[in-house]
Amino acid sequence: MSNIIQVLILGLALGGVFSLMGAGLSLVFGVMRIVNLAHPSLIIAGAYIAYWPFKLWGVDPLVMLPVATVIMAAIGVLLYKLVFEREAKSAKYSEMTVLLTFAVAMIVEGALGGMFTNTQRVTSPSYATEAIFIGDIFIPTGQLYAGIISIAIISALALFLKYSRFGNAIRATTQNRDAAQLLGVNVNLVGVVSFAIGIGLAGAAGVLVSFVFAFFPAKHWEWIAILMSLVVLGGMGSILGTVLAAFMLSVVAAFVGAYIGATWSTMTFFLALFIILLVRPQGLFGEKPELA
Amino acid sequence: MTDLLTVKNIIAGYGNGPAILDGATMTVEPGKVHCIIGPNGAGKSTLLKAICGMLAIREGEVIYKGETINGLRPDQIMRKGIAFVPQERALFPKMTVRENLRMGGFILEDKTELERRVDEVMERFPILKERRAQLAGTMSGGQQQTLAMARTLIVKPEIVMLDEPSLGLAPKIVKEMFDIMNVMAQEGITVLLVEQNAQMGLKQADWGVVLDLGRTLFEGPAKEVLADPRIQELYLGSNKAA
């Protein structure tokens, strides 16, 4: 029994981190209809923002969390203005963003690889190697902190979206862009800010990832499939759905890893993506796609 | 009386496609109900979209209170006082009725004033008060239309443009929609109505505009438009004219 609880706890902690990794991707798709394949590569960029100060000066990665969030949000604004804004009125915008973000992912990977090589890195503050013991059950503090901070950030985002004036404009734009415009919402501004928040979240996720997983520039290819499975299961554009999907799949993956084999753990996400697209392509909270 | 809005020979279409509006012209006087009629494909809805900025105008001018508003974004035009309720009602399906009403007052900076106006509108439309916590997407078609129209009252615009508010609604509900429109008119709001049921629309209106193939064929007092034999023959069906 304690073994099951142990696996459940590890799955939930991992789910917290994946929630944050997927939340930005979901927000950007929900508001902008941008399928951001570059999201995980930007998470890795965020991880490097935490890594180097830790490596060079021993700066705690958590101290770098707001810094990485702001830097990546600023990069988000730049990226949006340079790459996406001019195509925003294209009838095939979503399809084009797949190609554009694929290119961005390649560029980010190439740039990070060129600067930092493809050596595996990890930040190792003391808490990343410690654990809390409750009887027979241990909770790795690194994963615990990352999970708690992720949920705190997502909760703050949810409160912002629900109760602030601009947050309501973002929600409205997600649900009906034309209607939002007709009520006085500057949807272009909402788009830029949402994209910046999304990439800022990638930066924050990167900092947490830096002490939970080993990372290197090409790692994003593995993560994009994982994140897409979360976003698709949750329902494209639904942040709540993405968070629930992250917890569900992470727990399943933890059990698969514990009882079937660690190599099959990641396969859980890929298999889930395949099954969801076949059985319920709209996911848990998404709109049913039109067939016509 | 000075025109509130003037549409001068506008040419507009979707993307790079052919022009749907090909020289449409109309004048809008303050405080009156204007009904735009015409056969399918005449460009009625397109005209409203062009006025509110949802569709780029290729040529011509839309002048509102003496200012050319071509090229402004829909949110900028809305802030100037022109509200638009499109056919598809433009609600936020996953927001509650109250949240939808609050979004109706998005441009109001004063939160207390916004809440006061939301309460005021809910008092006026009891069905909205009753269903204030319900998600808009789960309401009936008539209730959604009531919400979409009532929502425009939050900011008290100068002009409300309604694109076929009766579309797909039962006759009893259609009457309720026209009652709401009449409330708007009584409050001094200028109404531009596109209505497929031309007779019903013109009977509610002060001014009629007849469009065909993107051009204005005729405009004048609604009673005259309704009585004009050519118009009856062409757009209303002569045997239907009562």
Image (tube, helix red, strand yellow):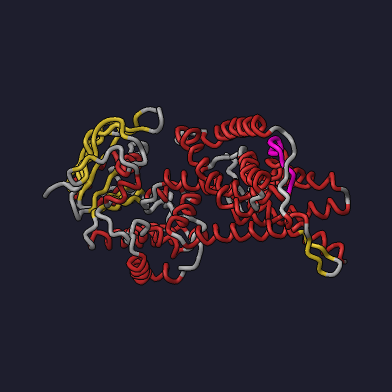
When asked about the image quadrant of residue A115, the answer is: top right
Q: Position of residue B4 (x, y in %)?
A: 19, 48
Report the side of A47 relative to B30 (left or right). right
Q: Position of residue A208 (x, y in %)?
A: 66, 51
- A112 shown above or below A231: above
Q: How many marks?
A: 0
Could you say which is closer to the camera, residue A104 or residue B200? A104
Give the residue at the far left of this rendering: B1
- Magenta region includes residue A215: yes
- Magenta region includes residue A54: no
Report the side of B155 relative to A214 (left or right). left
Q: Position of residue A154 (x, y in %)?
A: 59, 57
Query: Which residue does the image show at 44% across and 54% down from the upper left?
Result: A169
Query: Which residue does the image show at 20% across and 52% down from the upper left?
Result: B206
Query: Which residue does the image show at 53% across and 42% down from the upper left?
Result: A33
Report the side of A19 relative to B156 (left or right). right
Could you say which is closer to the camera, residue A26 or residue B44? A26
Q: Which residues are magenta?
A: A213-221
**One can see residue B213 in this view:** no
Query: Which residue does the image show at 55% across and 60% down from the upper left?
Result: A156
Report the side of A96 relative to A242 (left or right). left
Could you say which is closer to the camera, residue A48 or residue A232? A48
- B189 shown above or below A49: below
- A241 shown above or below A104: below
Quadrant in which the N terminus of chain A appears? bottom right
Q: Position of residue A69 (x, y in %)?
A: 56, 49
Quadrant in which the C terminus of chain A appears? top right
**One can see residue B63 in this view:** yes
Give the residue at the far front of this rendering: A57
